[in-house]
Image (cartoon, rainbow, N blue to C red):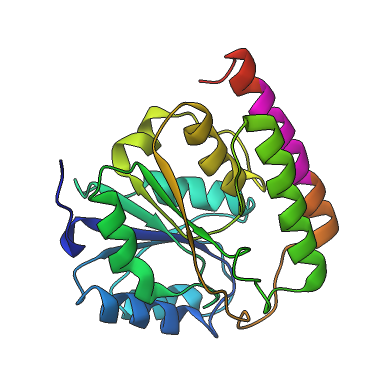
Amino acid sequence: MPEYAFDDVAVVMGTYDEEQAVGRVLDDIADVTDGQAEVVCVDSSSDRTPEIARERGACVIEQEPRGYGEAVREAVLAPKSDRPVVMTTDCDDTYPMDRIPEFLSILNDGVDVVSGDRISRGAEMMPAFNRFGNQLFAAVASALCGRRLHDVTTGMRAYRRDLLHEIAWTQNTGLSAELLLRPVMRGYVVVEVPIDYAERVGETTLNPVSGGAEIAGSILKICAEERLGLAG
């Protein structure tokens, strides 16, 4: 069984015009991991986000804006080192970076994916419409995949790096759901851990209505593909 340490971890994120928050997030990661974690940002910003990230030692990969999933998929597959753990987060300071050691400890128990569950603790800082939507996504996904899931769209997860390269990721806006549902439905060991969720810093760029519709469509498509054995 592996014994992962902080220098085995790559923390990755897609960044888009988050100059107000990204520095704080990167400082928190450095503090919690004693500066040992690799950080990769896939950036499509028009503000100072990439400069701030580079100033703090992050590897910044710039791409044209193509959506959340395109950036995060590039991020999770980007680390060129042999670091065996990839951890995703968002760059808006909503997720508790001080939980990284706990996520790592759970992976050390033989788990493939550790997923941060915002919903079980109420997610009171999340807009009510978004909170209801995330609860609905989880209920639908649970019914379709045959396992109770609490938060299928969280941005904070830790993965065995090999797993990320064993599955073909196809979704864009719905990638967060895909990154949980495909491993669950393929029998990987997936654990949800309740986490706190803070009010975001800065304005969101995701339209909750059109984005929600895309996520719902992704959940239906992913579950159907996995049930029928059509996915790569």
- Identify the image quadrant of the N terminus: top left
Instruction: Pick the residue in front: 132 or 60.
Output: 132
Q: Quadrant of residue 120?
A: bottom right
Q: Is residue 17 left or right of residue 38?
A: right
Can residue 42 be spotted in the picture? no
Numbered disc total = 0
Q: In this view, does 78 lie to the left or right of 227?
A: left
The residue depicted at 33 percent of the width and 67 percent of the height is 100
**Highlighted range, magenta:** 214-224
Q: Quadrant of residue 160?
A: top left
Residue 181 in magenta stretch: no
Placement of 205 over or under 171, stated as above or below? below
Placement of 217 over or under 13, stated as above or below? above
Placement of 28 over or under 68, stated as above or below? below
Q: Where is residue 114 in the image (x, y as percent from the top left)?
A: 41, 51
The residue depicted at 49 percent of the width and 45 percent of the height is 73
Can residue 157 be spotted in the picture? yes
Q: Position of residue 47 (x, y in %)?
A: 57, 78
Q: Position of residue 192 (x, y in %)?
A: 48, 53
Instruction: Pick the residue in front: 100 or 143.
Output: 143
Furthest-right residue in view? 209
Main secondary structure of the magenta stretch: helix
The residue depicted at 65 percent of the width and 28 percent of the height is 223
The residue depicted at 52 percent of the width and 82 percent of the height is 21
Residue 222 in magenta stretch: yes
Q: In this view, does 109 lie to the left or right of 47?
A: left
Instruction: Pick the residue in front: 129 or 171.
Output: 129
